[in-house]
C-alpha cells in the first residue's frame, strides 16, 4: 500500500485524520483506505481544492448588482462557470472560472470597474478541508426536542391521546399551508410568463396530509401544454415581434426546443428564471445526477427549501393516493406521525440531505399502509381493490402504469376493524420484528409479500414476452427493479424499490428497533399511565437511540448467522432461485451449506468425523421431502468444489432420486414448488482442528500478497487456502486437537431469511475453542459470501 498522508500512527494502531476514525491494525487500515467513505472524502477534498484554485473573491458590490452583471464582466478574462453571491453577510461574491488561467488573468489586471463601482478582487482564501461531524449535533437536537415533548406526553390520559398530541404538535399549521400556497401561486405566475399554459403542481409532504414543520416544498412543473403551444407556434409566419423562424424574440421559448431538450437543459433554464425573477429565492442549484433531476432552491423569507422537477408526474399521483388513504381511515395520520417520530429518534429515518441509507418518510408511510392492509380485518384496502372501486371516468394511466383509484374517500367502504391506536402501534412493531425483508418484496398493490425469487433470473425479453401473453403491459417494467436487503414496491411504479437505498446494516437496525418496540409494548409501562408520575406510554418508546440499553444475546450462545443477501449472489444462482419458485430459500440454504463445508474442508483444512450429516446427505433429504422439484431444479444442488456426488447424479454411494410416483407433474412453463409440508433439511458436522489456523493469520496473509493487489480478508479462496497451508507447514500441531459440532438451520418465511449455524465444543482440553469461534464470527460469513459469488 502506498504511503497515505492522512494516516497517523498511534500507540493503539492508526488514526485517519481525513475521516476522523481510529484503526486498530494494518489490515483494518488497508480496508479503510480502499473503502467508500475514505475514497469519497478524498474526491470531495480534491474537488474543493480545485474550486479554490479556479476562483476569486470579489467585494465592493452593491445590493442591486446581479450575478449576470458579474458573469458579463468577468467572462473577458476566461470562461465563467458559476457566480456565488451572499448579500446577507456583507456584499461579496465568489467567481468560478473553468481554467486557472482565468484566475491569473483577473489578478494580473490592476483595476476592475463595473457600472461605476470599483471592485476589489483577490485570490480566494484557502481553507483546510475538515469532515464536519453532524451526528453529535443531531443527537443533541433530538434529545432537546424530546425533552420539550416529554412533559406533555406524560400528562396525557392515554396512548391514543399521546399519538394525537404528537400529530398536532408536528403537523403543518394553517398559516404554513397558506404561505406555501402563496409561494406556489407566485411561482405559477412567474413560470407561465415564460412557459405558456404550464402548471406548477405541489406534491409530497406539503400536501399529502403528512407534512411536518419545515418539510421541503416539492413541485412538479408540467410543461406538456407548453410543448403543444410551442409546436403550434413554429409554422406561424414572420410578423411584428417575431424572428425569422417565427418565434417570439422576447420569449424564453426562442432559446430552447422543449420537445428535444434534455431534462437537465430545461432545468438549467428553470434555475435561471428562479434566480432572476422570483424575489427572496437564493441557493439555486441544479442536481442533474439524481434519479429524477431537480432544481433545488431556498426561499429566504419563509426559510423554506424547495425542489422543482419536470418529469415526476407519478409523484403527484402518489400524493393523491396518500390523501385518499388518510381520508378513508382517520387512524392513519396519528399512526404515521408517531412511527415517523419514533424512526427519527432512533436514527432510522430523517436524513437531512435526503440521501444515504436511511428510510425516507414516504417509505415509512407505505410500510404503515401495508401493515394496515394486513390486519384482520383489514384497516385499508389494497391498491387493486381501490382500482375496482373507481368509476370509468377515474381511470388513470401514467407512463404505462395503472394509477386508477377513487377520487373521493366516500367511494371506499369503511373498515370493520375497531382496534385503537395503542394496539395498532404495538402491532406495527410485532408485524415487522421478524419480517423476512431480504426474501420478500412488499406489494401494496396486492397487499401481500411476493417471493423475491419471482424477480430474479428473467431476462428483459422473457418478461416482455410473458407480459404480452398475459396482456399485462405494466409487468414488463419490473425488469428494472433494484433488489436489495429491503424491498418495498411503489404502489404504481412497480419497477421502483422505494427502499432500494437501504443497506443490510440499515435493515438490521430497523428490525432490531422493531423488536425492542415489540418487547416494550407488551409491558404495563406502555399500556397504563403511571400513578406516580413516571414515564410511560410513548415516552420511553421515543427515547433517542443510545438512551435505552440494548438487550444482549444470551450468555453462552455460540451461533453465527449468514443472512440472505442478493448482492452476494451471482447471476447464475439468481436464475436458479427464480426457477425454484417458493423453494428458493431451501435452494439458497443448500448452497450455503455446501459453502460452509468448503470453508472448513478446503480453506481451514478441518478434519470431519464420520458421524456427521453433510450438506450432500441433507440435499438428498431435502429432495425426498420435496413433492414437486423437477430434475433440472434438483441438479442445481451441484457441489462446485468436487466433493461427493450431488443429489440427482448417477449414484456412486447408492443414493438416488425419489421415484416419479411421488413427483407431481408441473404444467409446462410453471415454476416448481415445494410442498407445503416439506421440511428444510438441516445438515450438521463434527469437525476437528489440529492447528491454530486463526493465530497470526493476517501477518502471513500480508507476506503472501505483498506483491499482489491488496484485497480484503476473506475475499479470495486461493489466498486464504494458501495462508492455512503456510500455517500448517510452519507451525506445530496441537497436542490435543479441538473437536466441535456445527448444526445448521434455515430460518425464513415468517422472519428474516438466514442460515443459522450453532457451535458446540465436543473436546477442548486446551481451552482454544473460544478464540477459534471468535475468529469464525467474522471470517466464516465473509468466506461463504465469497464462495457463493465465485462458485455459486
Image (cartoon, grey):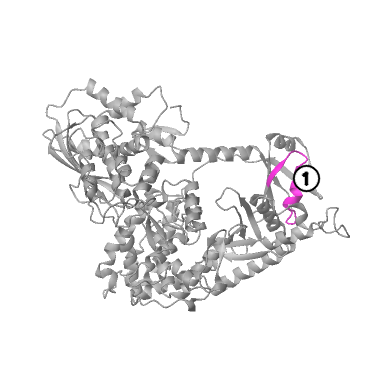
- Label 1: few (<14), some or many (≥20) within 10 Å? some
Membership of 150 in magenta stretch: no
Image-quadrant location for residue 544: bottom left
Can residue 555 be seen here? yes
At x 57%, y 47%, the residue is 289
Q: Nearer the viewer, residue 47 or 447?
A: 447
Percent x, y for residue 235? 81, 57
Q: Quadrant of the N terminus?
A: top left
Percent x, y for residue 782? 32, 38
Image-quadrant location for residue 440: bottom left
Question: What secondary structure is found at the residue carrying circle 1?
Answer: helix
Membership of 74 in magenta stretch: yes
Q: Nearer the viewer, residue 439 or 331?
A: 439
Q: Horizontally, is 258 left or right of 48 in the view?
A: right
Q: Horizontally, is 236 left or right of 709 in the view?
A: right
The residue wearing badge 1 is: 73
Outermost residue on the front side: it is 661
Q: Nearer the viewer, residue 300 or 781?
A: 781
Outermost residue on the top side: it is 730
Total marks placed: 1
At x 68%, y 58%, the residue is 274
Q: Which residues are magenta?
A: 62-82
Percent x, y for residue 730? 23, 20
At x 42%, y 33%, the residue is 8
Can residue 352 be seen here? no
Percent x, y for residue 292? 57, 53
Q: Quadrant of the C terminus?
A: top left
Amino acid at each position: 500500500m502506498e504511503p497515505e498522508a492522512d494516516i497517523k500512527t498511534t500507540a493503539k494502531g492508526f488514526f485517519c485524520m481525513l475521516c476522523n476514525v481510529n484503526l486498530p491494525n494494518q489490515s483494518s487500515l488497508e480496508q479503510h483506505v480502499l473503502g467508500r467513505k475514505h475514497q469519497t472524502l478524498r474526491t470531495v477534498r480534491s474537488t474543493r481544492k480545485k474550486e479554490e484554485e479556479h476562483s476569486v473573491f470579489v467585494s465592493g458590490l452593491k445590493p442591486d448588482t446581479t450575478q449576470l452583471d458579474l458573469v458579463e464582466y468577468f467572462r473577458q478574462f476566461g470562461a465563467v462557470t458559476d457566480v456565488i453571491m451572499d448579500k446577507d453577510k456583507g456584499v461579496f461574491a465568489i467567481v468560478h472560472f473553468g481554467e486557472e488561467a482565468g484566475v491569473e488573468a483577473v489578478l494580473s489586471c490592476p483595476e476592475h470597474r463595473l457600472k461605476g463601482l470599483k471592485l476589489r478582487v483577490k485570490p480566494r482564501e484557502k481553507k483546510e478541508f475538515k469532515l464536519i461531524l453532524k451526528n453529535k449535533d443531531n443527537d443533541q437536537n433530538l434529545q432537546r426536542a424530546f425533552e420539550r415533548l416529554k412533559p406533555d406526553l406524560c400528562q396525557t390520559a392515554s396512548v391514543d391521546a399521546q399519538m394525537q398530541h404528537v400529530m398536532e404538535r408536528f403537523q403543518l399549521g394553517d398559516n404554513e399551508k397558506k404561505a406555501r400556497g402563496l409561494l406556489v401561486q407566485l411561482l405559477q405566475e412567474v413560470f407561465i410568463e415564460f412557459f405558456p399554459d404550464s402548471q406548477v403542481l405541489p406534491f409530497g409532504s406539503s400536501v399529502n396530509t403528512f407534512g411536518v414543520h419545515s418539510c421541503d416544498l416539492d413541485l412538479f412543473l408540467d410543461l406538456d401544454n407548453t410543448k403543444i403551444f410551442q409546436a403550434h407556434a413554429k409554422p406561424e409566419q414572420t410578423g411584428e415581434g417575431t424572428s425569422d423562424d417565427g418565434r417570439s424574440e422576447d420569449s424564453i421559448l426562442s432559446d430552447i426546443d422543449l420537445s428535444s431538450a434534455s431534462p437537465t437543459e430545461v432545468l438549467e433554464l428553470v434555475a435561471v428564471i428562479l434566480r432572476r425573477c422570483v424575489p427572496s429565492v437564493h441557493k439555486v442549484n441544479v442536481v442533474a445526477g439524481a434519479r429524477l433531476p431537480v432544481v433545488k432552491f431556498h426561499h429566504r423569507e419563509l426559510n423554506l427549501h424547495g425542489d422543482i422537477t419536470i418529469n415526476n408526474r407519478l409523484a403527484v399521483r402518489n400524493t393523491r393516493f396518500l390523501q385518499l388513504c388518510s381520508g378513508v381511515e382517520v387512524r392513519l395520520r396519528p399512526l404515521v406521525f408517531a412511527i415517523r417520530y419514533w424512526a427519527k429518534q432512533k436514527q432510522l429515518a430523517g436524513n437531512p440531505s435526503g440521501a444515504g441509507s436511511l428510510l425516507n418518510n414516504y417509505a415509512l408511510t407505505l410500510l404503515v399502509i401495508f401493515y394496515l392492509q394486513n390486519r384482520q380485518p383489514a384497516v385499508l384496502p389494497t391498491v387493486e381493490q381501490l382500482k375496482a372501486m373507481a368509476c370509468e371516468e377515474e381511470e388513470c394511466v401514467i407512463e404505462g402504469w395503472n394509477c386508477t383509484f377513487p377520487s373521493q374517500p366516500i367511494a371506499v367502504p369503511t373498515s370493520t376493524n375497531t382496534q385503537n391506536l395503542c394496539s395498532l402501534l404495538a402491532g406495527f412493531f410485532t408485524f415487522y420484528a421478524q419480517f423476512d425483508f431480504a426474501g420478500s418484496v412488499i406489494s401494496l398493490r396486492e397487499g401481500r409479500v411476493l417471493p423475491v425469487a419471482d424477480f430474479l433470473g428473467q431476462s428483459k425479453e422473457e418478461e416482455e414476452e410473458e407480459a404480452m401473453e398475459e396482456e399485462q403491459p405494466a409487468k414488463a417494467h419490473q425488469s428494472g427493479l433494484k433488489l436489495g436487503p429491503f424491498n418495498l414496491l411503489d404502489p404504481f411504479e412497480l419497477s421502483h424499490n422505494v427502499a432500494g437505498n437501504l443497506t443490510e446494516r440499515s435493515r438490521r437496525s430497523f428490525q432490531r428497533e422493531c423488536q425492542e418496540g415489540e418487547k416494550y409494548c407488551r409491558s404495563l409501562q406502555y399500556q397504563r399511565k403511571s400513578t406516580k408520575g413516571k414515564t410511560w406510554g410513548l415516552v420511553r418508546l421515543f427515547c433517542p437511540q443510545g438512551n435505552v440499553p440494548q438487550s444482549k444475546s444470551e450468555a453462552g450462545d455460540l451461533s453465527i448467522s449468514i443472512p440472505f443477501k442478493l448482492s452476494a449472489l451471482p447471476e447464475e444462482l439468481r436464475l436458479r432461485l427464480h426457477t425454484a419458485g417458493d423453494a428458493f430459500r431451501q435452494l439458497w440454504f443448500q448452497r450455503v451449506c455446501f459453502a460452509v463445508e468448503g470453508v472448513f474442508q478446503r480453506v481451514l483444512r478441518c478434519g470431519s468425523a464420520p458421524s456427521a450429516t453433510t450438506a450432500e446427505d441433507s440435499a438428498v433429504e431435502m429432495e425426498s421431502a420435496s413433492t414437486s422439484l423437477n430434475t433440472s431444479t434438483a441438479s442445481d444442488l451441484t457441489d462446485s468444489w468436487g466433493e461427493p456426488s450431488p443429489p440427482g447424479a448417477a449414484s456412486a454411494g447408492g443414493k438416488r432420486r425419489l421415484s416419479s410416483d411421488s413427483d407431481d407433474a408441473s404444467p409446462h412453463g410453471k415454476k416448481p414448488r415445494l410442498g407445503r409440508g416439506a421440511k428444510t433439511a438441516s445438515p450438521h458436522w463434527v469437525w476437528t482442528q489440529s492447528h491454530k489456523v486463526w493465530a497470526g493469520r493476517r501477518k502471513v496473509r500480508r507476506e503472501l500478497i505483498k506483491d499482489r493487489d491488496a484485497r480484503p480478508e476473506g475475499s479470495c479462496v486461493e489466498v486464504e487456502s494458501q495462508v492455512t497451508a503456510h500455517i500448517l507447514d510452519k507451525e506445530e500441531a496441537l497436542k490435543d486437537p479441538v473437536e466441535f459440532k456445527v448444526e445448521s438451520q434455515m430460518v425464513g418465511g415468517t422472519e428474516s431469511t438466514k442460515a443459522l449455524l450453532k457451535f458446540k465444543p465436543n473436546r477442548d482440553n486446551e481451552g482454544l475453542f473460544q478464540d477459534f469461534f471468535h475468529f469464525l464470527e467474522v471470517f466464516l460469513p465473509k468466506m461463504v459470501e465469497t464462495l457463493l459469488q465465485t462458485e455459486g
